[in-house]
Image (spheres, helix red, strand yellow):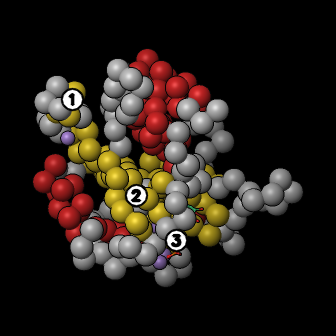
Amino acid sequence: MASGQLSRAGALACSGCRHACHVMLYCDTKTQLFGRIPIRHIILMQMRFDGLLGFPGGYVNPSEETLEAGLSRELLEELGVALPISAEDHVDCCHAPASSPSSTSRLITHFYVKKMEEEQIKEVEKEAASTATDHGQEVLGMVRVPLYNTKNGGGLAPFLSHSFIGNARSQLVDSLLRLDMIAPEELHKALAHSLKIHT
Ligand code: GTP
Ligand code: MN
Ligand code: MN
Ligand code: MN
Ligand code: MN
Ligand code: MN
């Protein structure tokens, strides 16, 4: 755990804090784009009702349910699938940035990562677009993260240049590095290019 970060237990000890839990679901894949660009991993994010990209999940009230049971409940609403999440899938948590410099945020965001089988991920995508109660309302659709850079600058760079909710963008980038999903040089190239796209 990096300094300045909260532990799961430390976060739960905060009285008066609200909690939100989100998860990065992913799998390995051998599929190639155009039959030649390895896709390597399917990572699921969602286009939210507010037009921002984020991970599936939501608010959890720890006085009513465990963080993980609350996250599973949110996943059932947003993905239409009951996925067990365990405390071992908890990666980190932090105070969400305050809305104004003078106020302190009372929201703690918890981040989880869960590796799945490719068939399970495809099942999640299917249910999210059909039986999920939040589909078309709080969730406009699931999206996969392009992990490659194409010759003409397509792929991860333009994906990262979109707008993300909270710190979802850094949750994604940190996970790509930590889980060794992309070479650091390739990631840094995409990050640098993503900053130039709308300027
Ligand atoms: P409601 O049913 O409308 O309450 O939504 P929800 O329970 O699904 O909550 P939501 O997913 O919007 O998450 C709650 C709060 O957590 C948001 O208002 C954001 O501040 C924050 N948040 C949402 N998604 C993410 C994410 O992917 N990463 C991080 N770090 N924060 C997020
Ligand atoms: Mn085509
Ligand atoms: Mn929700
Ligand atoms: Mn949500
Ligand atoms: Mn909710
Ligand atoms: Mn809701």
Closest to the camera, between mark 2 and mark 3, is 2
Three-letter amino acid code of the residue under disc 1: Pro
Q: Position of residue 139 (x, y in %)?
A: 41, 68
Secondary structure at numbered mark 2: strand
Of 199 and 97, nearer the camera is 199
Residue at 55% x, 49% y: name it: 163
- Residue 22 vs residue 113: left or right? right
Three-letter amino acid code of the residue under disc 2: Gln
Three-letter amino acid code of the residue under disc 3: Tyr
Above or below residue 99? Residue 196 is above
Residue at 17% x, 62% y: name it: 123
Mark 3 close to ligand 1, CB under 8 Å: yes
Mark 1 close to ligand 2, CB under 8 Å: no
Mark 3, residue position: 59
Q: Which tag, 2 or 3, sits closer to the chain's start?
A: 2
Residue at 48% x, 54% y: name it: 53
Q: Position of residue 36 (x, y in %)?
A: 16, 25
Q: Which mark is residue 46?
A: 2
Secondary structure at numbered mark 1: strand
Image quadrant where residue 96 sits:
bottom right
